[in-house]
Amino acid sequence: MMELVLLIIGAAISYFILYLVVKAAVKDAILETKGTKYDQDEQEQDTIAKIKCPACGQNYEMDYPKCPFCGHQ
């Protein structure tokens, strides 16, 4: 019975160490991709396209139903 308990504790410690190693590797990989072309492309996709109001000439985001500056539709 004691051998089984020690085996389970040993396995738990091994899996915990493996978890820490994998977590550190994933964190390093994420930090390496920050600021790269992939990250810049992702930021460009998050921006909303803008249109120019024909009435007042101001630029505003396309998701507005009308111009937030002058109210033109």
Image: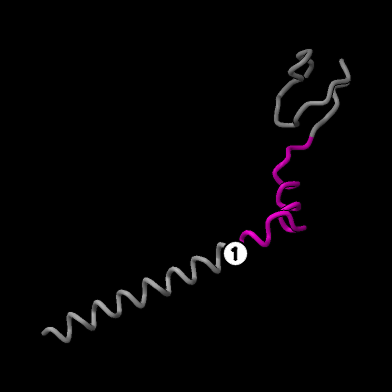
Side (left or right) of 51 relative to 7: right
Nearest to the observer: residue 41 or residue 1 = 1
Say above or below: 63 vs 40.
Answer: above
Side (left or right) of 23 relative to 35: left
Q: Of all residues shown, which one is farthest toward the left?
A: 1
Nearest to the observer: residue 59 or residue 27 = 27
Regarding mark 1 in the picture, which secondary structure is present there? helix
Please check the rendered image and state whether residue 47 is part of the magenta-colored stretch, yes or no: yes
Residue drawn at the location 23% of the way across and 79% of the way down: 8
Tag 1 residue = 28
Q: Main secondary structure of the magenta part?
A: helix
Amino acid tagged 1? Asp
Say above or below: 61 vs 36.
Answer: above
Q: Position of residue 48 (x, y in %)?
A: 73, 37
Q: Quadrant of residue 30?
A: bottom right
Q: Position of residue 49 (x, y in %)?
A: 78, 37
Q: Which span of residues is magenta-colored?
A: 29-49
